[in-house]
Image (spheres, rainbow, N blue to C red):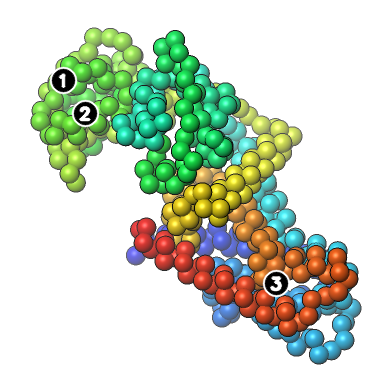
Amino acid sequence: MLEILSYIFWVLLAITILVFVHELGHFLFAKLFKMRVERFSVGFPPKVIGRKIGETEYMIGATPLGGYVKIAGMVDESMDAEFEASEPQPWEFRAKPVWQRVVVIVAGVIFNMILAFAIYAGLKMAYGDEYIPAENIQAVYVSDGSIAHDMGMRTGDRVIAVSGQTLERHDDLMSVEHMMSDPMTITVERGSDTLTFSGPSDIMTQLNRAGGFGISAHPSLVGSLTRNSPALEAGIEPGDRIVGMNGRPVQFWAQVTDFMQENEGRPVEVAFIKAPEGALIAPRTGEPVVATVTPREMDDRYLLGVGLPATNMLWEEFGIRTLNYGPIEAVSAGVTETWVTTRVIVTSLGRVFSGRENFRENVGGPIAIAQVTKQAAEAGAFFFWKIVAMLSITLAIMNILPIPALDGGHLMFLIYEGITRREPSLRVRMVMQQVGMIVLLVFMTFVIFNDLLRL
């Protein structure tokens, strides 16, 4: 129950922030143009709590997946059109110039983009950037049968470029921006040769199915040990470096785990270099200690009881580069990250809706969002706010789609009115609004059911 409540809390916090900022955009510009705002609601009815201040009722609804601002003289989610029986009043939405109504409609989307920019810029100011330079990673491990392996990559390759761009940060190897390139390519050095491999056209679907790309650079350093583990009993300690198993050389962490499964629980001779007193990690060369270890079986896997190297161990192994941002640099970096994220989301949506990527496997609903948001919150404030920024951009993009009942649908009618100098009939707008609501309900039902199937 506590786990479920944790999911609910974090996703509701994220959605409340996004919805409040979105509706605040509509609200402020409606007020600026002297439109009467009858209600500002975070969440849909039934009403949980509300208070009327002046001409506006501020409320929180019991249905948290959205919100709305009810502006006098506007056909919206409430489907209230009684105002059509009377002459337009100066404070009504319909009485204002088309350009003002356009601004009010797109203000929610603009505020979501501003929120994302502010978060990205704030994170750059607060945390800066810490990363491992790609040039410090001399080789990677490639899992047999993985996407990278099928492309042609092999263990020992040194990655130098992705999609034609020289790789500067190791983490950028798996960035969604690079994955979205058409075609996605990886260029490696293998001995004296430079080779370039192309990824599958449906790379995102393949990644979802495989659970990863199949590339790792984690060295075979021991990050932690479980209590009473076979490795601990053999004298292995955090920071030690495993360099051999049954006489087979070991360089990467994945080689350790792969060998343990291949050995099927039989005792194994583990060669490891001890970390010197006071050192975080063992050196890469030295006289190894050899111990016979009998793994334990758990959930059909054979385990030594050792954990991945910690982040500070990786930084010690490969070196770390730190960038700090002043206000001007943070603003510039915030703009860049907002633009890159927007481009990636638009591109990925285009690939999904064009049929290039599997629709069901690449679309997530509230449950998927809750899972990702909770994981980000558990990882720390930095990751939580990164997710909020990404969701804010996603909300902006989805809202501006030309679907009746969304901001893009209202904008579509206003553009028609601006071109033809004639407002669409009330009947057409009401019918289209109802169609839009049905489409959204069907889509929401689908994504929720799809989330449940993937649990």
Residue flagged by tag 1: what amino acid is it? Asn
| Circles 2 and 1: CB atoms closer than 8 Å | yes
Q: Residue at x 36, y 43 (%)?
A: 210
Graded by Cα atoms within 10 Å as few (under 14), some (14 to 19) or many (20 or more), the crowding at tag 3 reads many
Q: Which residue is mark 3?
A: 69
Dot 1 or dot 3: first in sequence order is: 3
Q: Which residue is mark 1?
A: 246
Of the residues tagged 1 and 3, which is closer to the observer? 1
- In what element is the residue under mark 1? loop
Q: Which residue is mark 2?
A: 259
Q: Residue at x 50, y 18 (%)?
A: 135
Q: Quadrant of the N terminus?
A: bottom left
Q: Is residue 29 above or below residue 295?
A: below
- In what element is the residue under mark 2? helix
Graded by Cα atoms within 10 Å as few (under 14), some (14 to 19) or many (20 or more), the crowding at tag 2 reads some
Q: Position of residue 311 (x, y in %)?
A: 42, 30
